Image (cartoon, rainbow, N blue to C red):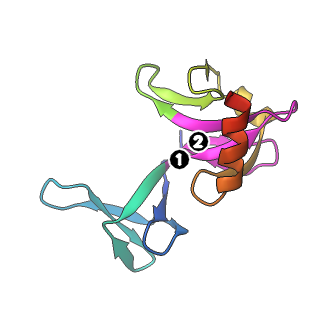
């Protein structure tokens, strides 16, 4: 069974936080609780249920690199109802889960802006 868990980017403190529980209040966006901390100003990212080739958990928003040193961003794709790897914003890699095992997490879209710039250069 897939383990369901989240992490959150705290927009105010600009740091990644571990989410330990979520609460929905009055039909609004969920309020996250992270070891006693709570906030409304965050970006929630779900764990894909997969790990990279080094055993690191892969989350939505992670940047991964393949053996050919191409960068990919892990995103949720509604039409496929699955997490996918985006390489050039119009190229979505379908996968059976094993594709992530041959890649390595090198960062994420919030903490590693230099990787986003490199990703954008590859897309040109």
**How far from the left and from the top, in percent, is residue 64?**
72, 41
Residue linked to disc 1: 3
Q: Is residue 115 magenta?
A: no
- In the structure shown, which secondary structural element does the residue marked by tag 1 occupy? loop
**How far from the left and from the top, in percent, is residue 56?**
73, 51
Label at residue 102: none
Q: Which residue appears farthest toward the bottom when viewing the image?
A: 36
Label at residue 49: 2
- In the structure shown, which secondary structural element does the residue marked by tag 2 occupy? strand
Residue ID at (44%, 25%)? 81
Question: Could you tell me if the residues under marks 2 and 1 are in contact, i.e. CB atoms within 8 Å?
Answer: yes
| Lower sequence index among marks 2 and 1 | 1
Q: Quadrant of the C terminus?
A: top right
| Relative to 6, 53 lies left or right | right
Residue ID at (48%, 75%)? 13
Q: Which residues are magenta?
A: 46-75
Instruction: Report, in whole angstroms, how far the alpha carbon at label 2 lies from the one at label 1.
Output: 6 Å
């Amino acid at each position: 069974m897939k383990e369901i868990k989240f992490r959150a980017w705290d927009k105010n403190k600009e740091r990644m936080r571990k989410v330990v529980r979520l609460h929905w209040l009055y039909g609004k966006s969920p309020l996250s609780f992270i070891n006693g901390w709570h906030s409304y100003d965050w970006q929630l990212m779900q764990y894909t249920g997969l790990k990279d080739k080094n055993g690191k958990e892969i989350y939505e928003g992670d940047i991964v690199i393949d053996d050919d040193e191409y960068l990919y961003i892990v995103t949720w794709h509604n039409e496929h109802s699955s997490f996918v790897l985006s390489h050039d914003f119009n190229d979505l890699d379908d996968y059976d889960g094993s594709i992530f095992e041959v890649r390595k997490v090198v960062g994420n879209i919030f903490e590693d802006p230099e990787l986003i710039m490199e990703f954008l250069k590859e897309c040109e």
